[in-house]
Amino acid sequence: QSVLTQPPSASGTPGQTVTISCSGSTSNIEYNFVFWYQQQLPGTAPKLLIYRNDQRPSGVPDRFSGSKSGTSASLAISGLRSEDEADYYCAAWDDNLNAVVFGGGTKLTVL
Amino acid sequence: EVQLVQSGAEVKKPGESLKISCEGSGYSFTNFWIGWVRQVPGKGLEWMGIVYPGDSDTRYSPSFQGQVTISADKSISTAYLQWRSLKASDTAIYYCARQTDDGGEYDSWGQGTLVTVSS
């Protein structure tokens, strides 16, 4: 059971907007930054997609956006493309555990 | 270019010891924390802990405290993850990653090391 809760799966058709949620608590999401990672193939290294709740590293398309409100965060992907098919993970520091906690991951399928 | 290069896949028996490595290049290795993340096949990411190569300060996830040892040798820009006695449940891919400013922010990752523990 992951400390951060994500839906196990999400799907959309090309061009659509998909949103992936990440639910946490006051010890993690509410008072700490949220990060999002994309893992395109199992066994390949994750890639930082969003940092500090809503910031994109250089090279990440602006189709990807992050937001946070209270104890929840979201990743939105607009203009969905086939290459967006991947696993997505949220992460945050947890003040009670003194550790980084990850969500269980959401497998995005582009139909 | 920031690069983290990990040691190759390992196949071990239960009870054996193991140390895997992660060599950093393209940046000041001593100035950034290095984290280790486990991924059991078919499962999600789990944070194990971090080491600061500048002074070898180390922090562990409660889930992994006492189960592994994280260390670094700044003279050769390399971080390590070590087990004294492997279990079958340690079978996983292990990633090292460079932590930037905030806990949870990993901007560069190693390619992963597959550790298989089987009798």
Image: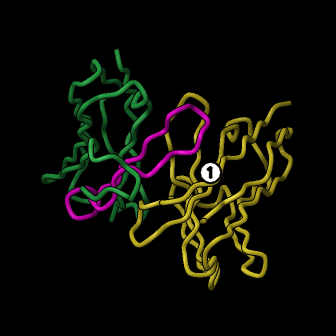
Measured as percent of width and height from the top left, residue B70 is found at 67, 65
Where's the C terminus of chain B, which quadrant?
top right
Residue B82 located within the stretch drawn in magenta: no
What secondary structure characterizes most of the magenta part? loop
Q: How many marks?
A: 1
Residue pictured at 72% horizontal, 74% vertical: B77
**Rendered image coloring scheme:** by chain
> What is chain B's hue in the picture?
yellow
Residue B84, quarter of picture: bottom right
Q: Is residue B37 left or right of residue A25?
A: right
| Tag 1: amino acid | Tyr
Of all chains, the one bearing label 1 is B
Q: Which residues are magenta?
A: A28-53
Q: Nearer the viewer, residue B28 or A6?
A: B28
Residue A39 located within the stretch drawn in magenta: yes
Q: Is residue B7 left or right of residue A17?
A: right
SS label for mark 1: strand
Outermost residue toward the left in this view: A69
Measured as percent of width and height from the top left, residue A16 is found at 22, 25
Measured as percent of width and height from the top left, residue A60 is found at 37, 49
Question: Can you identify the residue that label 1 sits on?
Answer: B95
Chain letter corresponding to the colour green: A
Residue pictured at 70% horizontal, 37% vertical: B91
